[in-house]
Structures are given as C-alpha cells and as structure tokens.
Amino acid sequence: MKTILVTGFEPFGGEQRNPSQEIALALHGRTLAGWRVVGAVLPCVFGESIVGLKKLLRAHRPELVVCLGQADGRADITPERVAINVDDARIPDNAGAQPVDRPVVRGGPAAYWSTLPLKAIVATLRARGLPSSVSQTAGTFVCNHLFYGLMHALRGRRSVRGGFIHVPLLPEQAKRSKTSLPLEKMIEGILIALNVAAIKGQASILLPSVPARRTPGNYPPGSPKPAPYPGRLPRRGSPLPLPEAGRR
C-alpha cells in the first residue's frame, strides 16, 4: 500500500493550539483511495523541523508528502506554490532562534516549486464549498523553512510528490476581526486535497527548481557558485518570477 505523509506543527508564538497539528493527528492511520496516511507533528524550530521530517521520510518512504502549517490572517486553505531559500524570522521559534536573511540550505537553489496539483486542489475544494486559493508565498518563518527542506530532500526523486498547505486559525484562536475556519472543515479540506494529489497528481507537471542567485546576506563568502540559469525555458512547467528574498 502506498503511503501519504502529512505533517503539522506544534503550537508556537504563545498559542495553545495549532490546527495543522490537530489535522495531522486526526488523519493518522486513515486509508484514502488505497493509500495509507501517516500523520506526524514536528517542532516549530528552525533546523530541528527538517531533521524530524527527514527521519519520517526514511522511516515511511512515502510517495506523497504534504506538510501543513497555520497562517494567521488567512481565510482560505492555501496550497503554497513556491519555497524560497531564506530564513527571516519576525518572531523567535520555539527554541528562541530568530535567524535573519539566512539561507535554509547554503548554496541551494533560490527556490523549489511545489509538485502538488495546486489548481486542481483549489478547484475541487471550491466545488465542495470550501474556501481555497493558491498562495504565492509561504513566508520566511519555519513553514517556508520546512517546505524548502522537504523539496530539497525530494530533489531528483520524481516518483515522490510534495508540497505545503497553509490553513487558517481555529475559531478559538481568532480574535476580533480575524479570520478562521472550523477544524472539521479543515480536516475535510485536507482530505480532499490529499485525494486530488494522490489521484490527479500522478499526471501533474514536475516543475524544475530555480537555480540559486547570489544576493547580499543570503550566501556567505566561500559558498559554491550557482549554476547559470538556462537561456531557454521549457514550454510547459516554466518557472515563474520569484518573490523577493525576505518578503513575508
């Protein structure tokens, strides 16, 4: 039986709950369209989160990996398009680290593209009455850090698809004027997303990573010089312009 790995994060930033954690735990052990779902919770800590993810990848050898995170201020379930090679924390992580303009992987590509069928996921969620849209930035906190670490770990493994999905706050977390979504709706939405990725994702286009660019603060002296970007892009799966490094 094929395996889907779903990860969430522990609460952070003073919160007592994190919907991504609760979704991952709720989905653990389920069977979906002939796929076994493994749910796990990772620390909201730079470095440690990627280490924990790599252990899960080795232990379960999944064919599909979807990492989840909490996005304060968003009303939609938002599959992320791109992970960028920069850590730039507005607040400390759960270990007290607050990196500024630091690469996730020294000498790594500037960005990796999700290999999930983003538009198909969004269209299916909307058809089921759930709010969803493609997000163009996963931020520069631990969510983007893990997303980049995932795609870097999966590089060259074209049989394994992966990506990141942000979910809104829970109603219990949302303060006045803030957006939220009930946990049951989020679980339903992620189940739909997993089903679309497992079934329709088999025909999805795998986009190439974008070669690294040397920018001040991102790559220290002595880091490997990135390969030049090819002069002509493929017709299908062409990379889009990247968001500026450090932008949240």
Image: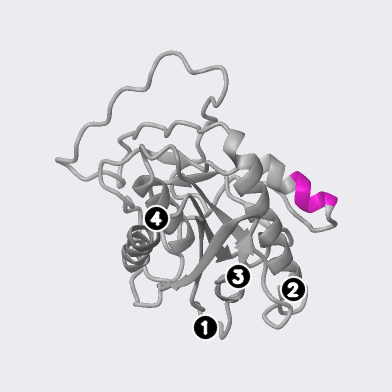
Task: Measure the C-alpha gap from mark 1 to mark 4.
Answer: 33 Å
On the image, which quarter does residue 178 sit in? Answer: bottom right
For the magenta stretch, what is the residue range? 123-127
Which residue appears farthest toward the bottom when viewing the image? 16
- Check residue 232 in the rendering and tell me which mark sits there, or answer none: none
Q: SS of the residue at dot 1?
A: loop
Q: Nearer the viewer, mark 1 or mark 4?
A: 4
Q: Amino acid at mark 3?
A: Leu
Using the numbered discs, state the Cα–Cα distance from disc 2 to disc 3 in whole angstroms.
Answer: 12 Å
Residue pictured at 45% horizontal, 70% vertical: 91
**Percent coordinates x, y for residue 177 in the rendering:** 77, 73
Are the residues at dot 4 and dot 2 in contact (C-beta closer than 8 Å)? no
Name which residue type carries label 4.
Answer: Arg
Sequence-first disc among 1 and 3 = 1
The reply to whether callout 2 and callout 1 are in contact (CB within 8 Å) is: no
Residue position for label 4: 61
Which residue does the image show at 35% across and 63% down from the upper left?
A: 59
Determine which residue is flagged by label 3.
27
Q: Tag on residue 184?
A: 2
